[in-house]
Structure formats: C-alpha cells, structure tokens
Image: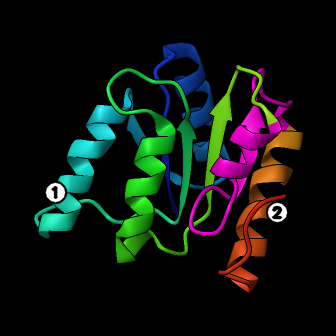
Amino acid sequence: MSWLIAEDETDIRNLVAMMCRVWGHETLVFEDGQKVWDWLDEVEAGVSQTNIPEFALLDIRMPGKRGDEVMRRMRTLPQFADIPIVLMTAFALSDAEKANLVSPNAADHILGKPLPDFESLRTLLHDILAKKQVNPESYGK
C-alpha cells in the first residue's frame, strides 16, 4: 500500500516517511504543496507514472499550495475520491475552521502537532484507513 506524505519540515517529513515504511507502506513524499499540485496535474493529464496512493497525510501550512488546497483538488479527481486524507497542523484551529476542513468530500481527520508517539500514530492512521475502507462516505472523527 502506498501513502502520500506532504510536509515541508524536513525532520517531520523524514520521520513520518520512515514510520510509514516500517509499517509496511511505500511512500510518495513531497516537500511542499506545489510539488503535490504539479504531480496532480500529471495524474489528471494521464501522464504520471506513479501509482495513486491509498492514503494521504498532508501538512496544512506549506509553501506553495496549502495542504487544504491540495486536499480539495484531490477530492475533485476520481482517483482520490475515496482515499483517506489526514491533515496535520501545529496551529490551533477554530471550530469553524475544523468544520470546514472535516466535511463531506474533504479531510477525514485533523492531526495536531506534535505528532503522537509511534504506536499511537500507527493505530490512529490505520483506524482511519480501516473505517474509510468499510464506509467510503464516512469522514471526520
């Protein structure tokens, strides 16, 4: 199973990618939102040689395109309509901001930074994945 990770902080990006690989997942890693956006252009044009990931973990505040912009674009493409998308942020969000991000055809979960410990993070992300596989219309937690 392939997971997409988009995070501009090098240490966090490398740590999350390493954890995902330890959990048995291939990783498709991007250092900013614009690079994900450019890849989505290739996917939409049918020229990408990369497999579509089954899960996406996106930082909200990245250079170029923000994670929430990338998420909304992904949701417009049929290949990403039903994959779980988790947004990460170190910033406090208002209830209105959370409601706007975790809604139908948007994010499945918002994960605060600092990230939970290795095992808690694994459990949380795999639970989100399992819930989405059982009920693709489900979202939010």
Q: What's the mark number on residue 127?
A: 2
What is the quadrant of the C terminus in the image? bottom right
| Any part of residue 27 in sight | no
Q: Is residue 5 magenta?
A: no
Up the image or down, 61 lies above or below 19; here it is: above
Decide which of tag 2 and tag 1 comes sooner along the chain: 1
Report which quarter residue 130 is drawn in: bottom right
Query: Going by the image, does 29 lie left or right of 116?
Result: left
**39 above or below 115?**
below
Q: Residue 72 appears at what percent x and percent y?
A: 45, 55
Q: Amino acid at mark 2?
A: Asp
Q: Secondary structure at mark 2?
A: helix
Query: For residue 99: magenta?
Result: yes
Regarding residue 108, the answer to whether it shows in the image is: yes
Mark 1: few/some/many CA within 10 Å (<14, 14-19, 20+): some
- Marker count (numbered): 2
The furthest residue to the bottom: 134
**How far separated are the C-alphas under marks 2 and 1?**
30 Å
Magenta-drawn segment: 95-118
Query: How far across and how far down the image is residue 98, in percent?
Result: 74, 43
Residue furthest to the front in view is 96
Element under disc 1 = helix
> Looking at numbered disc 1 in the image, what kind of residue is underneath it?
Glu
Residue behind mark 1: 42
Question: Is residue 5 rendered to the left or right of residue 100?
Answer: left
Label 2 or label 1, whichever lies nearer to me, is 1
Q: Position of residue 11 (x, y in %)?
A: 56, 15
Residue at x 71%, y 20% (from the top left corner): 91
Instruction: Write down the quadrant of residue 48 in the picture.
Output: bottom left
